[in-house]
Every structure is written in structure tokens, then in C-alpha cells.
């Protein structure tokens, strides 16, 4: 395992897209220390900010308050990164495989346009989780993102495939212009969930405020939920399935697009 | 995917028989908009002027502009996006939830009537103001109106346009686009332009405290930003160019007084419809122009060791 | 008092940017406007050629423009992530120079649009 | 002073076909001889007059609109770093202005014509061109839907219309005029199009597209403009549009005209399923009518952004693709539409378009009358020209590419049957000498004494694409602007404008009409000459030979 420890908080954001198992592959510690990082307009070295110890490996542990450190795990294809602390924007953006775990909070754009792998944030996340960058046709195209806390605006914007699960509440525009995939809301959302969605599924275990363009369709407990339940079980999440305890209400939309997406809201029996 | 479908103001003057103002108060904020460009003018194809046009105003409260409107639709605060999205569904004849529509403060019949009028007109235009673009939903509210207007073209001619506020903010968009490829919030730190609103927009940078110096011209963020942003401007070295000593000047390390745009400094400004206009200054100012001062600062920077990004900066494909 | 009349002046107070304003000035003040709205009229009348403010301030103290320009250049050159912001109430020519400056100091450049 | 020695010179305007000879340069011009100064050893290299792009979209309101509309393209485009000599920028489909200059010069092109400028925003176009370094520039003014002109044609006031056109060219500081979908953009303001060139346009009783076309062509000739009317025909891009194009060409007999991006106007078939190439039919007519020139408007597979004043076509394309749509109607003058587009080899329609561009370049037998363009960024980006040159020079490579097309495309195109291969001499004609002559720019497109010393020097290489992509040297105005792919000196180019004469009394008619129909002050409408950077006035000395 390679261990990096942040020496001092950078004064302005530090862009560190070199901090991935792929970039470290085949490099000894000195070579890793010499990799470039970008403090605003200055090109500096990894060891200007981090102490680097351990053995060359596909496993990487980063310690410190990295809230201003951006792009960790960018485009990684394999291996594992554990961030012990908070982390900055674009964590795991365009990631293809491997896994990232964050013990603290994460910022915006985590897993932006990712195509595979797993990101697990124990704390809160910012906005645009798994989203498309401005103007892009689609956001995350596979993979899994699990947020232990809350998440911000535009979670899963234009996502095409994959799963995003959030244990805390999410803010506005969750699933904005979604094209496919699944978003699991364990604790509901603020407003405009599923706005302009074309396809895909948003499941909320708490009642949520819907747009007028999501008319009620039916009550049901679809079998594919069992597949999703099986997929998220290893992440420590469980979906209520028992028809004795409740059902899902299905709202279809967004009829303004017009879209064939669905929002399933769990209704416990009273 | 929607888009942006617009026109210059003369097209509105000559043709628009349906004019919708959403979240703006032109009577007080753009006083000549009605008289010079829109409802009051006799147009080439609207010889009867005001009588030939329908004006609808959508806002959360009754403003001075209501008097000028044929129809006023009062929407509940924070419900604009819901209304526009419902309109997009109704335009296509799709289902909406009546009860949820009524939570917006408007009845389904009112929306249906609006849709019918929009489809019946020959040339429709929506002007949207900061009441729409600066409230909850922000850029998505603007996107909603722009998309509605684009989609209306399946039925009739329709355009939309933001009511730009500050003088030459449209010009800043234009200049940044041709020089950097992006309209605002452009990060040049890696030696080439990058764009990501929310990450590189000023209010976010200031509130997060992401910058370590600020150069402010043609604005007074010390009066308008949220307090944490103002704190950042006070903490880092801030430099201000302004014809007056502003709130920002008072918390800045450096202030330079400049001549007033259009009154003393010559040049170009863009109208809200992106038409460029020459400025005709009348008074000779005792102060240099912004243009001249910026040029002098560039000359002073040029004397120092040049900042030259290395090609490695591009290798990684960051956005 | 000689009064100069300027036709087709352009008002940059709001986004309408009306360019049909007639201005009467006495060399120091604009004393009369025609065609301008109330906002535009007060904008024109409230700006004069008088010297009401110091040329420049450094740390709140009066300074020469030369010294202020030097100080500005030093701060911006030294910064790791400077911001160039505003660009609304200035000419396109000034905006164009601001882009050039932002490029030389490796800045983020932004306008009111992003608010 | 500078001498280029030992290179094989291709200077078709002076009949020089690959002879080894020296080119001498002093004060930015080609001269007979120089003593002293720098010598460039061009042994093993070929020497071309600098490229001239007769039709491109690189500056102004429409392109700048497209930049804002497509951040996703910019993000993945080539980046230009801030250096001591050069400004930062972005390449791709809609390059920033600085990058545009570097990209053109970096490919050996030294003169470009921005093909679509509305009078109302001409100030803006000139500002952008000022920030487009190295290359020389000129603009075509959009005139095919100008209501001031159409209203006069409606009441039979041809002479007045002619003076208005001359006044507008002078006011906007442009070089020539362009008509885009004549009448169609005016109709688009009623939500319509003009598909029949002999039917009246919405809003008019008499004026039809044909009338606009014929009158504007005549006006250009009578004003003596060095470049004829630049025409984007009606029904661009639509299956079966070859009949419109042929009908249009017949209207032009007796006058000069430049047919822009002819590829987009050479289709047969009744709908998208039956669309086919009609390049043979079109080339046959074209070959026998020397009053016409054209540019290819070739298509290459890949991402593009379609940008045109043709508003109604762009609405159709938006509906067909479901992608983003930008539209900006310009009062009384024109419009513009923007839709991002991807040309795919697997798509039958795109396959036909790709073939038609090359077919026209091969079937039109006089290289002095067809020029290399892609209608940048509509058919492909200008920086991909070397790919097209390579295909023109190698029939076998073309056939190989044809084999990769869908089976169903093969019966709809002619490309595989064409054996012609361009020589270097002919490439020099379609990229430089020909367009310079069609533009009436006597100092461009050749290397004779007195010519501007705009010169591209390439390492001779059997791989034409490689050779033309990376010139060894590019000289602009006698200075080495590019050396081994690096920008060496960045000087601003000139802008050429025409000031055709008009009856000064025309303003008495124009001013009140303008004040009624426009929203700015008449006095603020023209572009001040000092706002046009490096302006050079070209003579309006064309005379019709009978």
C-alpha cells in the first residue's frame, strides 16, 4: 500500500489528477513524489504537499483534510483508493473501474461521467453526483455510487446507467434529465426530483414532492426491485419488499419531455 | 435537448403579436423596453401597434408592470419551474397532475388558456428576468423557458430572451466567448480555458475562499455578494477599478479611479439582444479609462518574470 | 457657458442600451438629456467631469496611479489563483484587455452572468 | 529581405509547375531579386502560394453563439497554451479567434473569407477578426433576405436597391455579398421557408427567390465588385434539391456567381430513404457555364457544428436530430441557426454527402472554378482540409473508403468510378490560386513579382495528408509565421473591404425607413473605418465582358 499524507492545507484548490493507481503504476516512491500537481496556476510536485510512504501497490491511502484537493482517482481503471478525511471536487470523475472510499465528506461532481467502479462516501456529498459535465449528452454510464450522508443539487444529472444510492436527503433536481439507471433515495429529496427525465428509475423510501408532470400511474411492486435490492445488499442497504407492510406508488414522467421514466415512492400500510 | 432560440429586438417590434414577460419588471427596471422595442411600438407587420399585441406578465407579485399587461398570472414564489414544465407538457397535449398544478397558484384552465394563446399567435416572445433566473432553480428556470420557446416552434414562430440587467454584461459574454470559447466563469490557471459553472463562478469561489487575489472592474461585489464572499475579498489582496470609491474599494488594498463608461470613455457596448453599439462620450474625464489602466497593469506584469504554463498541464484531460 | 449637444449617444445603464439619447453638456456636467428614461437621465446627470475622488488608493491612503498600477501588478503576479471579476459596466475594449490580463496572470475570469 | 532557394515551386497563376526556382522577398512582397538577407533552403521541399479559404465561418455573432452552445465540444478540443508569443485558446469545431489564426497559418493558409456577416452585427465580426491573428481577412455581407432590398424589388425599384446594396457594403465594411437561402430566411420569420424559387415569398406579392438571386447577381456585376455574388441556394441539404440548384444556375446565365458549398445542393431522390448523388448531372451543367465558380463544401465523417443563416433548415435539422438548437433572427436582414451534428459513415445520408463533395471536386474539370472548402464548421472543420487533399490525390484510397460504406450507399454514389487524381499543381489551384482569382484578389494566390509574400513550404512527402498538415515554413507578408509547426511571429493581418460607389442621396430614402423598421439610431448603424483593423480598400473595377 502507498500512503500519502497531506502536509498543509493548500491555500487555493489543488488539482491532483495524478493521484490514481494507474498513474502510480510502475513508479517507485521517488517518481511518485515528483509527479505534477497544480496549485492554481503553479505546477508543483506531489511531495510539495504530501509525504509519500509505503510500498508500490494498486492500493492507495490518502490522509488529511483534502477538501480543496480535486480530481483524486480521475479516470482510474483499477485498484483502490481510501481517503481518510474530506475530499474535494471531481473525485473519481470519468473513473472506469476499481473503488474509492471516503471516510469524511466529499464535494461536487464525484463520479462525474464515470463508466464503472464503486465510490463510497461515508459522509455527505455535494451536488452533481455521477452527473454529466455541462453540455455533455450523458452522465455516469455505469458503476455504483453510495453516499452515507446527504447529497446536493442535480444528483445523477443525465445519467445513463448504474446506481446512485443516498442514505441522507438529497436536494433539488435529483435525476435531472436522467436517461437510464437507478437512483435510490433512502431518505427522500427536496423538490423537482426527476425533472425532465427521459428514462430510468428513481426509488424513494420517503414521501417526496413531485412535479405536476409526474401523474400517478399505479400501485405495484415490480420484480426488478428484487434485482436492485440484491445489488445494493452488499452496500448495507435494504429495500422494503413485503406487500404486507406496504407498496410502491408509481409516477411516470416527465410528461413535459415527454419521458418514460418512473418515480417509485414507498407507501407503508397504515 | 432544447437550446436557445432568440432574435434581435427589432423582430419583436416588427412582428411579435404575443409578448410574455416572466419574472421581470420592465416598467421600473428597463423603462423603455415597452415603448422602444415591444408592446407600444407600431411594427412593420403590426401597424395597429399595442392593439395588435397581447401582453402577458407572470410574476410572484403585482409590480408596476401589471398595468401594461393584458393578462397577469401570479405564481407562488419558487414555483416558476413547475409552471414552465407543466406548460411544456400541455403544449404537447400530455397529462399533468391537476392538484400539483394548482399548488403553483395557477389553475389548469389558466395554463391551458396560455398555451392556446401561445399556439394561436404568429410570432411569440418570452422575456425573462432575474425574478426567474435568480430564484430557486436558477439556470434551470432559464433553461425551462428557453426550451419551452424552442419547442413552440413546432406550432408557430417563437423566441425567448433574457432581460439582461447591468449595462454591458452582454458584451462580457461576447468577448469571453471569442477569446476563450466560454461565456463566463472561465478558469485560465492551467494555461488554457476551462469552464464549469458552480466551480469557477465568482460567488462560489468567494464563498469557498478558493482564490488568493481579486481584480474587480465594472462591479461592486462588496455590496452584492453573500457575507462569506465579502470576507474573502477583504482577506485577499483585492484591486478595484471604478469611477467611484465603492463598497469593494473600501475593503480593497488598491483602488484606481477610472472614467465613466459611455460618458467619458469611448468604445462598444452590447444590447441585451447582443447587438453592438458605439459609445459616444461627451465629457473629458480627469481619470484614465478602465481600458487604459488595465493596459498599464499588463505592461507592469510584463516586466516581471513571465508565467508560462508547461505542456504537462494539458496532459491529464481534466475538464 | 458653452453648451455642446451630442446626438445618438448610448446609455449603458441597463440592458436596453438605448442609443438615441440627446445629451447637452457644459464641459463639466451633463445638464439635459432627451429621450432617456428616468433611470438613464439620472445616470447621465449624476456623472460629471469633476475630480471627486482621489486618483488611486493603496491600503486606503491616497496614491498615484503609477504606484497603484505597480501594486496591482505585484499582487496579481504573485497570486496562485487570482480572480478577475465584474466586466459589466465597462466597454468591450476594456473587457478585451481584462481577458489579456487574466491570461498573463493565470486567473479565473468571470462576469455578472454567473450570479 | 529573404530568399527561398532550391524548392519546387507550384505557382499555377504564373504557369509554374514544379520548377526549381528561387523566390525573393522584400517589404512583404515577392520581388525579382534580393541581395543579402536570410535564405531559406527549400531543397526537397515544395513551395505553394499561401492558402486562400473562400468560404468559412470563423467570426461573428453566429459562430460566437455556437461557442457558447457547445461547451462539451470545447472541453475535448485541442488546446492552445498561453506562451510568450501566442494567446491561449481552444481549437475544435468552433475555435476561439486566436486559435483560428494559428490553425489556419499552421496549415499554410494565409487568407480567409468569413462568409456570413449581418450588417447589424458587422461591428462584432470585425472585432473578432481583429483578434484573429496572422491571416488576412475579408467578409461577405448577408443580403439575400434583406427586407430593405426586397421591399424595393417588390415595387420594381431596381436602381434604388442597387444603391442601397452599395451603401450597406460600404457601411458594414465588407468585401462582397452573400445570399443565403434567398427569401427563405425572411419567410422563416413567419415560421415558413422558400422552397420554390418562382413562388412569392411570405410577406410579398411579387418577390420570389429567383428574383432576389438574379437581381443581386446583376447588382454585384454592375457595382464592379471584385467577387461575384456568393450564393447559398434554396433547399440546402434536402433530397432532390439538385433541381432547385440547376434552376438557380439557369437564372444566373449572363452574370457571374459563386455557388457556395455545392455539395449540399447536389442531391437526388424524393426523401431521406431515397437520397442519392446528383453530382454528375450538376457537374455537366457547371462545366459548360464558365460564368460560375463554386466551392466544394465537402463533408468528412465526425463531429461538426452546423451554423448557417438558413434558419428554417436548422429548425428541420433540430427536429431530425433531437439535439440542441440555437437560433437568432436578425431584424430585417437575416437569421442564423446552430445545431451540433455528427456525420457517420454508417448513415446512408451522410455517406452520400461525403461522396458528393469529393465527386464534385473530381467531376468539375476546371480546377480554377471549384475550390476546397468544408463550409467550416458545417461539413467538417477547416483544419481537416489535408484529409480531403489526400483523398483527391489517391483514387485507390478513395475506393478503399467507399468499400467501408454501407452496401446500400454504393448504388447512390459515383465515387468508386472516378479515376481522376489531383496533381500538386491542381491542389495549388483549388487551395490558393483559384479562390484568389475568384475573389478578385490580385495580390493573393500567386508568387509572381508584386504578389504578397504569403507562402507555404512543405516537406515533399508521398503522404499528402501529412505533408499538407505540417508545413515546414509558412510565410505571411514575407515574415516567417510558422516554422516546424511552431508559431514564430504573430503579426495581425489586413482586412480587405470594398467601397462601391452609390448615390449619396440614397440616405434620404434610407434613413426614415430605417428608423421605422430598426431599433438603433441610423447614425450608429455603419461601422467606423477605424474599427476595422488593418483595413485595405480593394478596387471595384470588375467589368463585364460582352
Image (spheres, coloured by chain):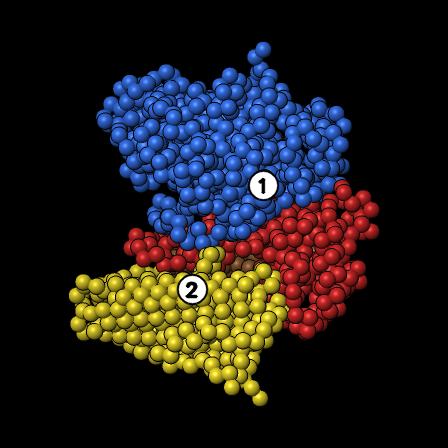
Chain colours: A yellow, B red, C brown, D blue
Question: Mark 1 or 2, which is nearer the eye?
Answer: 2
Q: Secondary structure at mark 1?
A: helix
Quote the CA–CA distance across marks 1 and 2.
34 Å
User: Relative to D164, is B204 above or below?
Assistant: below
On-image quarter of the C terminus of chain D: top right
Residue at point 32% right, 32% down?
A: D397
Residue A231 appears anywhere in the view:
yes
On the image, numbered disc 2 is attached to which residue? A161
Q: Position of residue D451 (x, y in %)?
A: 41, 22
The foreground one among D452 and A36 is A36
Question: In the visual, does B59 lie left or right of B50?
Answer: left
Residue at point 42% right, 81% down?
A: A238
Residue at point 39% right, 76% down?
A: A230
Q: Are marks 1 and 2 on the same chain?
A: no
Q: Which residue is the extreme one toward the top?
A: D546
On the image, numbered disc 1 is attached to which residue? D313
On-image quarter of the N terminus of chain D: top left
Residue at point 59% right, 18% down?
A: D253
Question: In the visual, does D390 lie left or right of A191?
Answer: left
The foreground one among D30 and D462 is D462
The foreground one among D156 and D350 is D350
Q: Are marks 1 and 2 in contact (CB under 8 Å)?
A: no
Q: Secondary structure at mark 2?
A: strand
**Tag on residue D269?**
none
Residue D100 appears anywhere in the view:
no
User: Relative to D50, is A245 above or below?
Assistant: below
**Chain letter for mark 2:** A
Q: Position of residue B27 (x, y in %)?
A: 74, 60
Disc 1 packing (10 Å; few <14; some 14–19; many ≥20):
many
Amino acid at each position: 500500500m502507498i500512503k500519502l499524507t497531506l502536509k498543509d492545507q493548500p491555500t487555493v484548490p489543488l488539482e491532483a489528477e495524478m493521484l490514481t493507481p494507474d498513474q502510480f503504476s510502475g513508479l517507485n516512491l521517488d517518481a511518485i513524489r515528483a509527479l505534477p500537481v497544480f496549485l492554481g496556476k503553479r505546477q508543483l510536485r506531489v511531495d510539495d504537499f504530501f509525504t509519500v510512504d509505503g510500498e508500490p501497490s494498486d492500493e492507495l491511502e490518502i490522509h488529511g483534510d483534502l477538501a480543496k484537493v480535486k480530481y483524486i482517482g480521475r479516470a482510474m481503471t483499477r485498484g483502490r483508493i481510501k481517503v481518510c478525511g474530506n475530499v474535494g471536487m471531481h473525485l473519481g470523475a470519468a473513473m472506469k473501474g476499481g473503488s474509492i472510499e471516503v471516510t469524511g465528506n466529499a464535494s461536487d461532481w464525484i463520479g462525474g461521467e464515470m463508466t464503472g467502479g464503486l465510490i463510497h462516501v461515508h459522509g455527505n456529498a455535494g451536488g452533481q453526483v455521477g452527473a454529466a459535465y455541462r453540455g455533455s449528452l450523458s452522465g455516469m454510464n455505469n458503476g455504483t455510487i453510495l453516499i452515507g450522508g446527504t447529497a446536493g443539487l442535480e444528483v445523477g444529472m443525465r445519467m445513463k446507467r448504474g446506481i446512485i444510492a443516498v442514505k441522507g436527503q438529497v436536494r433539488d433536481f435529483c435525476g435531472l434529465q436522467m436517461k437510464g439507471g437507478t437512483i435510490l433515495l433512502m431518505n427522500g429529496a427536496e423538490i423537482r426530483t426527476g425533472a425532465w427525465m427521459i428514462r430510468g428509475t428513481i426509488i424513494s423510501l420517503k414521501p417526496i414532492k413531485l412535479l405536476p408532470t409526474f401523474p400517478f400511474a399505479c400501485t405495484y411492486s415490480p420484480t426488478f426491485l428484487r434485482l436492485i435490492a440484491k445489488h445494493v445488499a452488499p452496500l448495507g442497504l435494504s429495500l422494503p419488499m413485503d406487500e404486507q407492510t406496504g407498496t410502491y406508488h408509481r409516477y411516470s414522467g416527465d410528461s413535459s419531455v415527454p419521458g418514460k421514466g418512473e418515480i417509485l415512492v414507498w407507501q407503508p400500510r397504515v | 435537448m432544447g437550446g436557445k432560440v432568440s432574435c434581435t429586438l427589432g423582430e419583436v417590434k416588427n412582428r411579435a403579436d404575443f409578448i410574455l414577460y416572466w419574472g421581470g419588471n420592465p416598467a421600473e427596471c428597463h423603462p423603455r423596453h415597452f415603448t422602444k422595442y415591444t408592446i407600444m411600438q407600431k411594427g412593420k407587420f403590426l401597424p395597429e401597434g399595442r392593439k395588435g399585441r397581447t401582453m402577458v406578465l407572470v410574476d410572484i407579485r403585482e409590480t408596476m408592470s401589471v398595468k401594461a399587461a393584458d393578462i397577469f398570472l401570479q405564481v407562488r414564489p419558487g414555483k416558476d419551474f413547475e409552471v414552465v414544465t407543466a406548460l411544456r407538457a400541455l403544449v404537447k397535449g400530455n397529462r399533468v397532475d391537476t392538484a400539483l398544478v394548482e399548488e403553483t397558484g395557477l389553475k389548469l384552465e389558466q395554463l391551458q388558456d396560455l398555451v392556446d394563446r401561445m399556439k394561436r399567435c404568429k410570432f411569440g416572445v418570452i422575456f425573462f428576468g432575474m425574478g426567474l433566473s435568480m430564484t430557486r432553480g436558477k439556470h434551470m428556470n432559464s433553461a425551462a423557458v428557453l426550451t419551452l420557446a424552442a419547442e413552440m416552434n413546432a406550432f408557430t414562430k417563437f423566441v425567448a430572451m433574457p432581460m439582461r440587467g447591468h449595462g454591458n454584461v452582454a458584451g462580457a459574454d461576447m468577448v469571453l466567448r471569442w477569446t476563450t470559447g466560454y461565456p463566463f466563469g472561465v478558469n485560465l490557471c492551467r494555461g488554457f480555458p476551462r469552464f464549469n459553472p458552480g466551480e469557477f463562478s465568482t460567488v462560489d469561489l468567494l464563498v469557498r475562499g478558493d482564490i488568493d487575489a481579486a481584480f474587480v472592474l465594472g462591479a461592486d461585489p462588496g455590496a452584492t455578494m453573500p457575507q462569506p464572499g465579502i470576507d474573502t475579498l477583504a482577506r485577499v489582496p483585492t484591486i478595484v477599478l471604478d469611477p467611484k470609491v465603492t463598497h469593494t474599494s473600501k475593503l480593497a488594498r488598491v483602488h484606481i479611479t477610472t472614467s465613466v463608461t459611455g460618458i467619458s470613455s469611448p468604445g462598444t457596448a452590447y444590447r441585451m439582444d447582443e447587438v453592438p453599439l458605439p459609445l459616444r462620450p461627451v465629457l473629458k474625464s480627469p481619470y484614465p479609462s478602465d481600458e487604459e489602466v488595465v493596459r498599464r497593469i499588463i505592461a507592469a506584469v510584463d516586466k516581471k518574470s513571465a508565467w508560462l504554463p508547461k505542456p504537462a498541464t494539458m496532459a491529464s484531460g481534466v475538464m | 457657458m458653452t453648451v455642446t449637444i451630442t446626438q445618438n449617444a448610448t446609455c449603458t445603464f441597463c440592458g436596453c442600451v438605448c442609443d438615441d439619447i440627446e445629451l447637452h453638456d457644459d464641459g463639466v456636467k451633463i445638464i439635459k438629456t432627451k429621450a432617456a428614461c428616468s433611470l438613464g437621465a439620472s445616470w447621465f446627470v449624476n456623472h460629471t467631469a469633476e475630480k471627486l475622488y482621489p486618483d488611486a488608493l493603496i491600503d486606503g491612503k491616497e496614491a498615484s496611479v503609477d504606484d497603484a498600477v505597480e501594486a496591482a501588478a505585484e499582487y496579481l503576479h504573485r497570486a496562485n489563483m487570482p480572480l478577475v471579476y465584474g466586466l459589466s459596466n465597462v466597454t468591450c475594449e476594456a473587457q478585451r484587455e481584462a481577458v489579456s490580463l487574466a491570461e498573463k496572470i493565470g486567473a479565473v475570469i468571470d462576469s455578472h452572468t454567473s450570479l | 529581405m529573404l530568399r527561398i532557394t532550391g524548392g519546387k515551386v507550384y505557382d499555377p497563376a504564373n504557369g509554374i509547375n514544379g520548377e526549381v526556382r528561387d523566390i525573393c522577398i522584400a517589404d512583404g512582397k515577392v520581388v525579382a531579386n534580393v541581395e543579402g538577407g536570410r535564405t531559406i533552403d527549400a531543397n526537397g521541399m515544395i513551395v505553394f502560394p499561401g492558402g486562400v479559404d473562400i468560404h468559412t465561418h470563423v467570426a461573428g455573432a453566429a459562430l460566437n453563439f455556437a461557442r457558447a452552445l457547445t461547451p462539451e465540444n470545447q472541453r475535448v478540443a485541442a488546446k492552445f497554451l498561453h506562451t510568450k508569443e501566442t494567446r491561449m485558446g481552444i481549437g475544435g469545431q468552433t475555435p476561439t479567434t486566436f486559435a483560428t489564426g494559428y490553425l489556419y497559418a499552421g496549415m499554410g493558409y494565409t487568407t480567409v473569407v468569413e462568409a456570413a456577416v449581418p450588417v447589424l452585427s458587422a461591428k462584432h465580426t470585425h472585432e473578432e477578426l481583429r483578434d484573429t491573428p496572422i491571416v488576412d481577412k475579408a467578409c461577405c455581407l448577408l443580403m439575400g433576405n434583406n427586407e430593405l432590398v426586397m421591399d424595393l424589388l417588390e415595387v420594381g425599384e431596381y436602381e434604388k436597391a442597387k444603391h442601397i446594396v452599395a451603401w450597406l457594403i460600404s457601411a458594414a465594411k465588407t468585401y462582397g455579398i452573400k445570399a443565403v437561402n434567398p427569401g427563405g430566411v425572411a419567410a422563416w420569420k413567419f415560421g415558413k421557408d422558400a422552397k420554390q424559387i418562382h413562388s412569392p415569398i411570405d410577406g410579398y406579392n411579387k418577390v420570389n427567390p429567383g428574383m432576389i438571386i438574379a437581381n443581386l447577381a446583376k447588382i454585384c456585376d454592375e457595382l464592379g465588385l471584385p467577387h461575384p455574388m456568393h450564393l447559398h441556394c434554396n433547399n440546402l441539404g434536402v433530397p432532390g434539391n439538385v433541381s432547385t440548384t440547376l434552376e438557380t444556375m439557369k437564372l444566373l446565365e449572363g452574370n457571374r456567381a459563386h455557388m457556395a458549398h455545392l455539395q449540399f445542393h447536389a442531391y437526388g431522390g424524393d426523401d431521406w430513404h431515397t437520397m442519392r448523388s446528383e453530382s454528375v448531372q450538376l457537374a455537366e451543367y457547371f462545366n459548360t457555364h464558365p460564368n460560375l465558380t463554386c466551392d466544394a463544401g465537402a463533408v468528412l465523417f465526425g463531429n461538426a457544428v452546423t451554423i448557417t443563416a438558413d434558419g428554417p433548415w436548422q429548425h428541420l435539422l433540430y427536429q431530425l436530430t433531437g439535439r440542441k438548437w440555437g437560433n437568432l433572427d436578425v431584424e430585417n436582414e437575416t437569421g442564423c441557426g446552430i445545431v451540433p451534428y455528427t456525420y457517420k459513415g454508417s448513415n446512408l445520408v451522410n455517406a452520400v454527402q461525403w461522396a458528393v463533395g469529393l465527386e464534385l471536386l473530381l467531376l468539375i474539370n476546371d480546377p480554377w472554378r471549384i475550390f476546397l472548402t468544408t463550409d467550416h464548421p458545417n461539413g467538417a472543420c477547416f483544419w481537416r482540409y489535408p484529409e480531403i487533399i489526400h483523398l483527391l490525390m489517391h483514387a485507390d484510397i478513395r475506393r478503399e473508403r467507399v468499400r467501408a460504406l454501407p452496401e446500400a450507399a454504393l448504388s447512390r454514389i459515383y465515387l468508386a468510378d472516378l479515376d481522376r487524381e489531383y496533381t500538386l499543381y491542381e491542389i495549388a489551384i483549388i487551395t490558393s490560386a483559384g479562390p484568389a482569382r475568384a475573389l478578385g484578389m490580385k495580390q493573393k494566390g500567386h508568387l509572381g513579382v508584386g504578389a504578397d509574400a504569403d507562402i507555404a513550404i512543405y516537406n515533399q512527402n508521398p503522404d499528402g495528408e501529412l505533408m499538407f498538415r505540417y508545413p515546414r515554413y509558412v510565410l505571411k507578408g514575407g515574415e516567417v509565421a510558422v516554422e516546424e509547426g511552431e508559431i514564430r511571429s504573430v503579426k495581425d493581418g489586413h482586412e480587405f473591404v470594398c467601397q462601391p460607389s452609390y448615390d449619396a442621396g440614397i440616405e434620404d430614402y434610407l434613413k426614415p425607413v430605417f428608423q421605422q423598421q430598426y431599433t438603433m439610431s441610423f447614425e450608429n448603424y455603419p461601422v467606423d473605418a477605424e474599427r476595422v483593423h488593418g483595413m485595405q480598400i480593394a478596387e471595384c473595377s470588375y467589368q463585364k465582358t460582352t
